[in-house]
Amino acid sequence: MKELLLSYKRNLKYTKSMLVNACQRDKSILIGIVRDLQYAIEWMEAGRQPGTKRGVERLAAYQRERPFDPLIMQRYFRSNEVIYPWNNDNKDNTVSSEERERIEDALSVLTAKEKEVYLMSRGHCLTYSQIANYLCISSSSVQTMIERAEKKVSKRRYDSIFCLSS
């Protein structure tokens, strides 16, 4: 990594020296290269995205929390699929009846579209872009629906009678 950083710094210095004698058309390209090199160097030196005040390890608790454990959501989703008699490893794919009731209660507040997107994301572990391609919508719409669904599920989870059993 140190060699890569050193290489970027050398290239930055070389690019800046080229910028002095370049024509106007080339200057705009070289300025872009300098900006990109500076960004990459800052990223490598800081160990996180330039311009951010905190690293991902220092996110606030509400930004890290998920209404449900992702593994439980995946098991819930898989437990709703058809179970074949020759498949004997059902223990990993099932959720308890209590977990099932809590999840179904929390998901009951979502619209049909939000539920579909939420289950595709949390159950099938699809990326936002994959979901957007399947549903022919934009990735930002998927992100908005999932954020809205997470808020609703989180609120329902703590307002529900089932939260007393957890």
Image (spheres, helix red, strand yellow):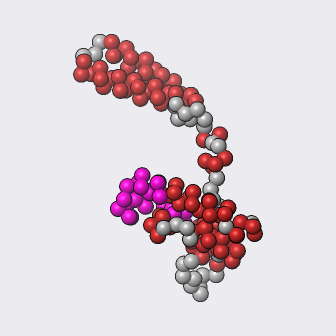
Figure disc tally: 0
The image quadrant of residue 2 is top right
At 46% from the left edge and 54% from the top edge, which residue is drawn?
144
At 61% from the left edge and 67% from the top edge, which residue is drawn?
106
Q: Relative to 97, say whether 121 is above or below.
A: above
Q: Relative to 114, say whether 1 is above or below.
A: above
Q: Main secondary structure of the magenta part?
A: helix
The image quadrant of residue 73 is bottom right
> Residue 101 at what x, y percent from top left?
65, 74
Looking at the rendered image, the quarter that the C terminus falls into is bottom right
> Residue 134 at what x, y percent from top left?
38, 64
Residue 146 appears anywhere in the view: yes
At 66% from the left edge and 47% from the top edge, which residue is drawn?
61
> Residue 48 at what x, y percent from top left?
56, 35
Q: Which residues are magenta?
A: 118-145
Residue 47 appears anywhere in the view: no
Residue 136 within the magenta-colored segment of the rendering: yes
In the image: residue 49, left or right of residue 71: left
